[in-house]
Amino acid sequence: MNWLETLRTAADAVRSHRLRSLLTMLGIVIGISSVVLTVGLGLGAQDKVRSQIDALGSNLLIVSPGSSTGSSGVRGGFGSASSLTLADADAIADSTVAPDVAQVAPTTSSSSALAAGTTNWTSRIVGTTTTWPQVRARTLTSGRFFTAAELATGANVVVLGPDTASQLFSRGNPVGQTITADGTTLTVIGVLAESGATSTTSSEDDLAVVPITTAQRLSGATSTALASLYVEARSAGSLSAAYQEVNAALLTAHDVTSSSPDFSIATQDALLSTANSTNKTMTILLAGIAAISLLVGGIGVMNIMLVSVTERVREIGLRKALGATPSAIRRQFLIEASLLGVSGGVIGAVIGVVGAVILPSVINQPVSISAPAILAALGVALGLGVGFGVYPASRAARLTPIDALRSE
Amino acid sequence: MSTVLSAAPVRTIIDLAAVRKTYATGAIAVEALRGIDVRIAEGEYVAIIGPSGSGKSTLMHILGCLDVPTEGRYELAGRDVSDLAEAELAHIRNREIGFVFQQFNLLPDLTALRNVALPLVYAGVGTAEREQRALRALDRVGLSERAQHRPGELSGGQQQRVAVARALVTEPSMILADEPTGNLDSVASADVLALFRELHDAGRTVVLITHENDIAAQAERVITILDGEIRSSTSKSGDVRSGDLT
Ligand SMILES: Nc1ncnc2c1ncn2[C@@H]1O[C@H](COP(=O)(O)OP(=O)(O)OP(=O)(O)O)[C@@H](O)[C@H]1O
Ligand SMILES: [Mg+2]
């Protein structure tokens, strides 16, 4: 009896007990679809974090006020005065102090009510310097960024984020129009392109960028407390050198020791791995649940196959009486079990893929469809069918023909 | 011109010596067969007759390698079956023996055609040839127009004839039929018996189990079995032999 024939016999058996076969597969269907979905969610979250962090700019170091060493949390920073100043930015930008630093963009950040005509919108006002677009890898869809002259004089100009622009000016080109921020009238000179990060990072697209001098005037602050300092290294290879230089320069400037810094420096990689480690824990947890449901599914297949062997003892006896060898019987039941496993796997994969397509619009989380994960899941389903089919199949093969024939 | 009158040596195909079969059901042991000695030559047509419970089916199951004797020796075509592996026995059942079971034993999910073709599946015959041969076998028992019916849609007699067709389909050298006419009217019964006669004439060994004398009379030799023992073995030629001498 060849394999194709055995497959046909097995398919007939699966088909003639349609409901039971479906119920048998259920565990595997649930297991495989949840594997496909959890892996998809995990990868989707990873992709999202990567694109968010990439959207910050390339070869980037982010210096924040306050220390985040150890478990003591953030020190300094938002207390009396921010630990980062424009002087720090100037120090780092000095090519003799930090030769591996290409550019520095200091930023301030504050929330402010903006108005264009009768339209109001609260947004984040970012004060910075002319290097900001390059360091943060941002481009403009229309207009221009502010110039060094405008920075020096603290001109009343503003570059709007795409979301801010569409909120304030629902139609028409905002460039050349004016808005008011905290009673000061600002002329819109440009609109930023979208940051490239996914929709949930609206803060990267909902902002109003002004010269840092203008920002100081708007907020009425006397000191220049920076929210963060974006530092672009010359290349990916010089990122760690730049890190050392910036760290050393700031330690000297602030006159603190490396054991108790009042600032912290993050790299994109560090941000990425922090974000991913949280994701990974979630993914592992979910995958563990999926694995357990696969195991339960496999046991379900074994259970039903054992029932099926008991129920079909007469059939087995007859087949043996007509010339089926023990190995032909074993093969028949093994293939039947594998067929249940694979069918369950295919149904599960289809449900998983459909879920991966539908889910993002429901939970607002990207879910990626990973071909290797689907193939692996199908392999696991086949393995479950074979693995849990071995015992029932060998029991069927061992039956003696006459005992099997005579049983009722 | 000389005529060589040497008759072809008659080969013994079935040789049972002191075969006993004991069923141990709980506390009571049932002795279904108590020392059967029987020889059947290749091409012989033998009827085994006896009352209900005398051990006829038990004997046939042993003859067909479906069951093994508790004691004694069974040689099939010169080979002791207790020496044969399960796979070899399966091969013998498939190629050499055609069974007609007392309870038909048809698979309810398969059509008559596929039931008949089942032994050919295990003989490795391709689909097209299988169907063709199964259809021919059904035709021989007059059931070709019922080929696509399932056993549940057939009468008892029709099911019995499907079982006969299944025994014929592999063209086995030996037919073992357990009450093959039990559910048939006299016309259908005569048809099946004519079929066995045809097979016998073609050189096949036929062992027919029955409890009716006029059906047993069709055979060349009638073996009477009573309480698991052979009472007599009567050949058509007339000589009566005591069973334990054969
Ligand atoms: N599996 C079994 N377990 C216990 N006893 C059995 C078993 N099979 C048969 N027997 C007993 O063995 C004896 C012979 O049974 P067998 O089926 O061979 O009779 P039979 O001659 O074919 O009868 P019938 O004409 O009714 O078919 C009976 O007494 C029966 O009860
Ligand atoms: Mg019987």
Image (spheres, rainbow, N blue to C red):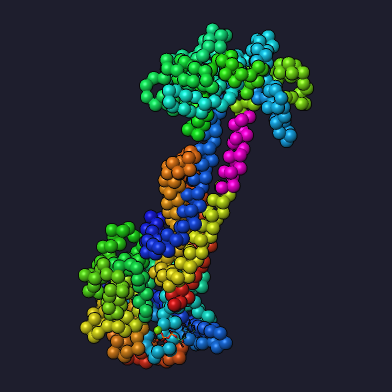
In magenta segment, residue B131: no
Toward the viewer: A246 or B57? A246
For image coordinates 59% across by 20% down, the residue present is: A219
Note whether B35 is above or below B118 in the view shown.
below
Q: Quadrant of residue B155?
A: bottom left
Residue B230 picture location, percent across and down: 43, 89
**Quadrant position of the C terminus of chain A in the picture:** bottom left
Toward the viewer: B138 or A148? A148
Note whether A315 is above or below A284 in the view shown.
below
For image coordinates 43% across by 49% down, the residue present is: A351
For image coordinates 74% across by 18% down, the residue present is: A254
Residue B202 picture location, percent across and down: 28, 73
Q: Quadrant of residue B226?
A: bottom left
From which residue to which does the magenta span run? A270-286
Toward the viewer: B100 or A193? A193
Residue A291 picture location, percent across and down: 56, 51
Q: Is residue A154 visible?
A: yes
Residue B184 picture location, percent across and down: 27, 83
